[in-house]
Amino acid sequence: MDFVEKDGRLLYLYHSHITLLIESYNSFRWSKFRFLQVPLNYWDDKGNHKEVFDYIALKMMILRYEDWYYLDPVEMNVGNSIFYNVYGGSLPKALNEIYNIYRWAPWRFNRSTKFVLNNEDQLQMLLDKISFDLQLTREEDWYRVSWDVISLFEGGTQSIKNYGGLYKILKEYYPDVQWKEEYLLGSAGTEKGLIFNAVKKASQRWLYGLVKQIYMDMEVVEEYQHPELCFPEGGRITLDVYVPHIKVGFEYQGHQHYHDSKFYGASEVRKARDLKKKNVCQQNGITLIHVPYWWKKTPQSLHLLQQALLNLSPP
């Protein structure tokens, strides 16, 4: 009716139909970004970027910053113009600018999300996270990190591969260390399985890190050779992970403990030896826990392990 009765003068006065609607129905809370076409220079205001993502958070029930890590950008449905034109379709890039008070970890985002660790601080965060969770306290501990364990850090595998492998990363960040490329992730030797014990050692280290977090105030020893315990046929007993104060040991049981292997031989031999070790420990008041290779090395497993060990802790 405006064009018919007033010759379009109202639209001319307000410059756009969006402004006209907002002024005419000011009791309604309008979201300008939801219109098919936003006002001129609308995206120049960073506050409008935040308004879009606040709306997405409300719609997708994102209550904490961490919830953004699990969002598939395809599900957003709104704000596509700014998301692709301004941020290149990268959710980590958008969130890093819009919610810059939070320290984002790009490798934790959904696998379908675009991200590249091209920021030194972000890459250092990933190294620090791996180092802390695996309790990597010595240079040589890095040689025990396998792809199997790296995959437990959301996005970690792709991030390290994109950067050229662990050797390249460590060489750049710790240049004073003479790293041996053939023993680190990304080398042909590791990928072809020339280091047969790498996966076992890395998984054992992960187990050690979890136990260390549970018993923070106690001594936790890896590769503990008991000064007194021996196998019936001779030979000292070594425990993968041991907590002396409560006399609890952990043994990581790789694939070869359950299945025959060309490299390790018949599994029955290992099973018999495992049973001997467990019996000797039991006779000497040590609780030995076998952790199978199919154990899910997730943060949730830490809590399950804590619950299982509550009765083993001293009063």
Image (spheres, rainbow, N blue to C red):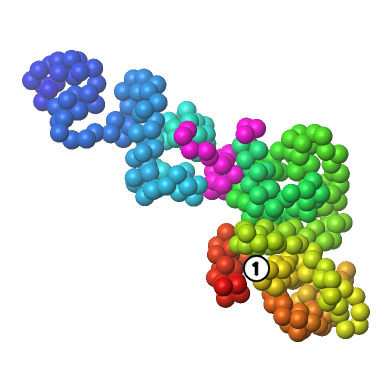
**How far across and how far down the image is residue 309, in percent?**
59, 72
Foreground pick, 275 / 74:
275
Foreground pick, 242 / 65:
242
Residue 48 at least partly seen? yes
Task: Look at the image and give the residue range highlighted in magenta.
Answer: 100-121
The amino acid at mark 1 is Trp
Question: Circle 1 sits in a helix, a strand or a loop, which is it?
Answer: loop
Farthest residue, direction left: 5
Residue 204 at least partly seen? no
Task: Residue at 55%, 64% (x, y): give it.
Answer: 303
Tell whether 198 sits left or right of 57.
right
Q: Name the residue under label 1.
A: 295
Residue 49 sits inside the magenta stretch: no
Task: Residue at 62%, 40% (x, y): give it.
Answer: 125
Q: In which quarter of the image is residue 228?
A: bottom right
**How far across and how far down the image is residue 273, in percent?**
83, 80
Q: In which quarter of the image is residue 15?
A: top left
Tell whether 91 sits left or right of 178.
left
